[in-house]
Image (cartoon, rainbow, N blue to C red):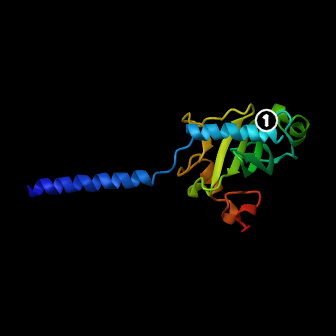
């Protein structure tokens, strides 16, 4: 009888430990909610003329993997669901014989992908409330090597991916091109 009680206690401890580890598991990404929000975000960016056929462009600058040989990076604020969100938009250009002049003259022909970081208060402590999405040039959400849509807390807790790289940004705000989000407002 005592052995059975110890066995039952060990099982209960194991179940409790599993429940704890599940509760601490990194959030999923590429979920239906992530994809629905990505759709709203793309629409808001097009309406604000930040992307799409009527989108504004800035001067391309040299990039590096995984984003592309040349980038076009800018920040803005966009309304989604009656809340204004800060966004960082990066057009990623790639191709054979690419150069700055070619991208500036005809950016659409070199556009490989669009990376967006959106500040979403209360979203995730692990991402410092950043929501990520990687779009194709047509606005479709791209998928990673495991066929998971790259929207949400992309690759949180992994050694590679958006968050693994951006956690190293100076200023503790996950942003490389400025430290605006690390400063108190």
- Residue at 64% across, 59% down: 168
The part of the image, by quadrant, that contains residue 105 is: top right
**Left or right position of 101 against 175:** right
**Left or right position of 182 against 62:** left
Report x, y in % for residue 159.
55, 51
- Vertically, is 151 above or below 178? above
Report x, y in % for residue 29.
56, 43
- Vertically, is 185 above or below 164? below
Pick whichever, 82 or 35, lies toward us: 82
Which quadrant is the C terminus positioned in? bottom right
**Left or right position of 79 against 174:** right
**Residue situated furthest front in the rendering:** 82
Question: What secondary structure is marked by label 1?
Answer: strand
- Residue at 76% across, 45% down: 90
Which quadrant is the N terminus positioned in? bottom left
**Left or right position of 112 against 29:** right
- Residue at 52% across, 44% down: 28
Query: Dot 1, how many residues are within 10 Å of its Cα: few (below 14), some (14-19), or many (20+)?
Result: many
How many numbered discs, if any?
Answer: 1
Report x, y in % for residue 160.
58, 48
**Residue situated furthest left in the rendering:** 1
**Residue situated furthest bottom in the rendering:** 184
- Write down the residue under mark 1: 111
Report x, y in % for residue 162.
63, 48
């Amino acid at each position: 009888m005592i052995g059975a009680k110890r066995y039952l206690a060990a099982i209960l401890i194991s179940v409790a430990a599993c429940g704890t580890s599940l509760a601490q598991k990194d959030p999923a990404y590429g979920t239906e909610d992530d994809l629905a929000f990505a759709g709203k975000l793309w629409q808001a960016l097009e309406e604000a003329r930040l992307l799409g056929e009527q989108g504004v462009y800035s001067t391309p600058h040299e990039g590096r993997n995984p984003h592309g040989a040349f980038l076009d990076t800018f920040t803005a604020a966009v309304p989604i669901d009656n809340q204004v969100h800060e966004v960082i938009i990066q057009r990623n250009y790639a191709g054979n014989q690419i150069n700055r002049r070619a991208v500036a003259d005809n950016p659409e022909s070199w556009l490989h992908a669009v990376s967006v970081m959106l500040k979403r208060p209360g979203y995730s402590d692990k991402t410092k409330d950043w929501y990520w999405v990687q779009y194709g040039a047509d606005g479709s959400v791209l998928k990673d090597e495991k066929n998971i849509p790259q929207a949400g807390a992309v690759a949180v807790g992994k050694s590679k991916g958006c968050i693994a790289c951006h956690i190293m940004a100076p200023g503790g705000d996950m942003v490389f091109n400025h430290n605006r989000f690390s400063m108190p407002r």
